[in-house]
Image: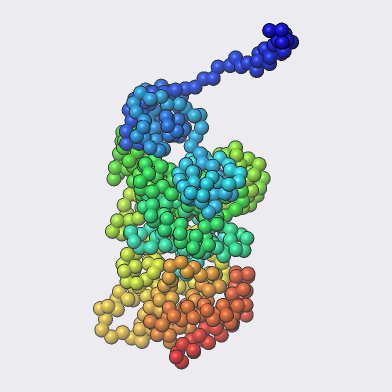
């Protein structure tokens, strides 16, 4: 006892008293009334907000969707098997968000932003981006004026896509919709190698897990994974995880867009997202509308797709953008863009069904893939007649615009003539010539998968077809001609490729080099 010093005791007591907190922490806690099928009704959370995150037992999070008089309807973002009636639920006070940073490139994430590729945590600094966010206002946008090269001849020449545009890819199952989207991602490698990357986000919503793994392998094999993020919510996931996956993809894209860089997000596909969304309101007893979809299914897609935009090239004005997350304040730059390529699957080519017509009315054009064309051997099976881009022409490069102007018209005339010529026994020479030209143009637009073309190669091939320089080449040899022309230009006319890629125009010098190359390839083929 004699060793205890009173001054030491008094100093310890003084420290403890100084650190004493008298404030009480108030937590709002509710009780689960009913749980099942991925939804829960909760009593006692009278101050809960729509879209707020709730904390259930076992680390499962939920999201408030229904605000009713005496209870709250929430969807569970995870496994609900251990959650039962009578359990307590806490409010988090936060809205649903995802952590985004430079480290998401090359990774496969789930809807909540957790890595699922087995490569560990996301490296580097991360920023919290909300899943739901208001689209940028009119003041903060600028018209689409820059092309997004897809590397697909038929699209870049006739249905061009601009950075910041929303272009729908629509068609029946197994018509090559995902192939078009994947080729577009692969084509961005050219810009990544130049140090001007377009950051790509591929959202797989309601797909088979094996399909997602296949897509990831293709991207890795072709060197596209370093600038691509895959958001996967397979069909085995609960419905809420599936319908929020596109919002997670949009949030990742917005991070790149708001920091002044171009981004491309692919929603594969929104018809599966609409089906998973339909499930939740029906379980929450919301009234069904057309095709049993809830009344706000249009708003679901419109608020998602409106987030794609070309941001004004003014840092000061861009930094004042509406609904900017706190994490990005002070880091916003102008001039960024978010391009959206939503995919919709139709049934038996019925584009007048509820979800297809909704999304067609929201987007700035559509690329229609026809199963008839696909089965006839035309790949990609793009029906040029009903495909349209309402913006892209303004963003098209002068080089391709100059020569592709008549291509769409010639193909439309060919389709019409081909339909009539079936009934005619003998055709005049002019009609035969036009049919022959149309068939060769069709052949020219064929393109194998995972083989995107740069601008110069596209210009060369389209020029040869439109100017009638391959009219003597046999129809079955046209695809071979296109391949040999590409090889010849790479080896013998590298200046042509260099000039077109740098100047983005077809100058007189480049044109004469191209004519020379076409005649060389043609004469060697015909001689053989």
Please say which color scheme the image uses. rainbow
Say whether residue 274 is visible: no
Q: Is residue 445 above or below residue 222?
A: below
Q: Is residue 161 above or below residue 399?
A: above
Split into 4 quadrants, where in the image is the C terminus? bottom left
Task: Identify the residue at horizontal 35%, vertical 38% (top origin).
Answer: 280
Pick out the residue farthest to the bottom: 527
Drawn side of residue 209 relative to residue 263, left or right:
left
Say whether residue 195 is visible: yes
Task: Identify the residue at horizontal 65%, vertical 15% (top origin).
Answer: 16
Closer to us: 120 or 155? 120
How many numbered discs, if any?
Answer: 0
Q: Position of residue 451 (x, y in %)?
A: 47, 69
Closer to us: 81 or 178? 81
Task: Identify the residue at horizontal 35%, vertical 59% (top origin).
Answer: 171
Q: Position of residue 189 (x, y in %)?
A: 55, 63
Q: Which of the 4 image quarters holds residue 411?
A: bottom left
Task: Identify the residue at horizontal 42%, vertical 62% (top origin).
Answer: 179
Q: Which of the 4 image quarters holds residue 196?
A: bottom right
Closer to us: 217 or 458? 217
Pick out the residue farthest to the front: 2
Q: Position of residue 455 (x, y in %)?
A: 54, 70
Split into 4 quadrants, where in the image is the N terminus? top right
Drawn side of residue 131 relative to residue 237, left or right:
right
Q: Is residue 266 above or below residue 481?
A: above
Drawn side of residue 187 relative to residue 260, left or right:
left
Q: Is residue 303 above or below residue 29?
A: below
Q: Position of residue 384 (x, y in %)?
A: 40, 67
Closer to us: 182 or 416? 182
């Amino acid at each position: 006892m004699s060793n205890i010093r009173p001054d030491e005791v008094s100093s310890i007591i003084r420290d403890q008293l100084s650190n004493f907190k008298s404030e009480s922490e108030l937590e709002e806690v509710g009780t689960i009334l009913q749980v099942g099928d991925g939804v829960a009704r909760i009593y006692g959370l009278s101050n809960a907000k729509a879209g707020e995150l709730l904390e259930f037992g076992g680390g499962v999070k939920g999201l408030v969707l229904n605000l009713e008089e005496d209870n709250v309807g929430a969807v569970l973002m995870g496994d609900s098997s251990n959650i039962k009636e009578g359990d307590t639920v806490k409010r988090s006070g936060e809205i649903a968000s995802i952590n985004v940073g430079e480290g998401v490139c090359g990774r496969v994430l789930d809807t909540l932003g957790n890595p699922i590729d087995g490569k560990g945590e996301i490296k580097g600094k991360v920023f919290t981006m909300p899943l739901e966010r208001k689209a940028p206002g009119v003041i903060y946008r600028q018209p689409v004026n820059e092309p997004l090269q897809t590397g697909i001849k038929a699209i870049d020449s006739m249905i061009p896509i601009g950075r910041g545009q929303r272009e729908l890819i629509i068609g029946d199952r197994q018509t090559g919709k995902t192939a078009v989207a994947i080729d577009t991602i692969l084509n961005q490698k050219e810009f990544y190698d130049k140090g001007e990357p377009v950051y790509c986000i591929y959202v797989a919503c309601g797909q088979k897990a094996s399909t997602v793994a296949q897509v990831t392998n293709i991207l890795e094999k072709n060197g596209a994974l370093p600038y691509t993020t895959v958001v996967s919510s397979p069909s085995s996931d609960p419905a809420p995880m599936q319908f929020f996956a596109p919002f997670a993809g949009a949030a990742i894209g917005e991070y790149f867009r708001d920091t002044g860089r171009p981004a491309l997000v692919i929603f594969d596909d929104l018809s599966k997202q609409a089906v998973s969304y339909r499930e939740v309101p029906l379980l929450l007893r919301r009234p069904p509308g057309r095709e049993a979809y809830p009344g706000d299914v249009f708003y679901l897609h419109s608020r998602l797709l409106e987030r794609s935009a070309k941001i004004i090239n003014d840092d000061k004005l861009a930094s004042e953008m509406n609904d900017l997350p706190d994490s990005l304040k002070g880091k916003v730059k102008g001039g960024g863009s978010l391009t959206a390529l939503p995919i919709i699957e139709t049934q038996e080519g019925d584009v007048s069904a509820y979800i297809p017509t909704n999304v067609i009315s929201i987007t700035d054009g559509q690329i229609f893939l026809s199963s008839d064309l696909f089965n006839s051997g035309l790949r990609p099976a793009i029906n040029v007649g009903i495909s349209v881009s309402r913006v892209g022409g303004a963003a098209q490069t002068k080089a391709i615009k100059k020569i592709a102007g008549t291509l769409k018209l010639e193909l439309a005339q060919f389709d019409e003539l081909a339909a009539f010529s079936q009934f005619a026994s003998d055709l005049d020479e002019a009609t035969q010539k036009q049919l022959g030209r149309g068939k060769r143009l069709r052949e020219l637009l064929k393109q194998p998968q995972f083989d995107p073309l740069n601008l110069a190669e596209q210009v060369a091939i389209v020029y040869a077809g439109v100017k009638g320089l391959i009219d003597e080449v046999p129809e079955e040899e046209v695809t071979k001609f296109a391949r040999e022309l590409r090889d010849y230009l790479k080896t013998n006319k590298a200046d042509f490729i260099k000039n077109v890629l740098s100047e983005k125009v077809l100058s007189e010098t480049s044109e004469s080099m191209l004519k020379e190359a076409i005649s060389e390839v043609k004469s060697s083929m015909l001689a053989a």
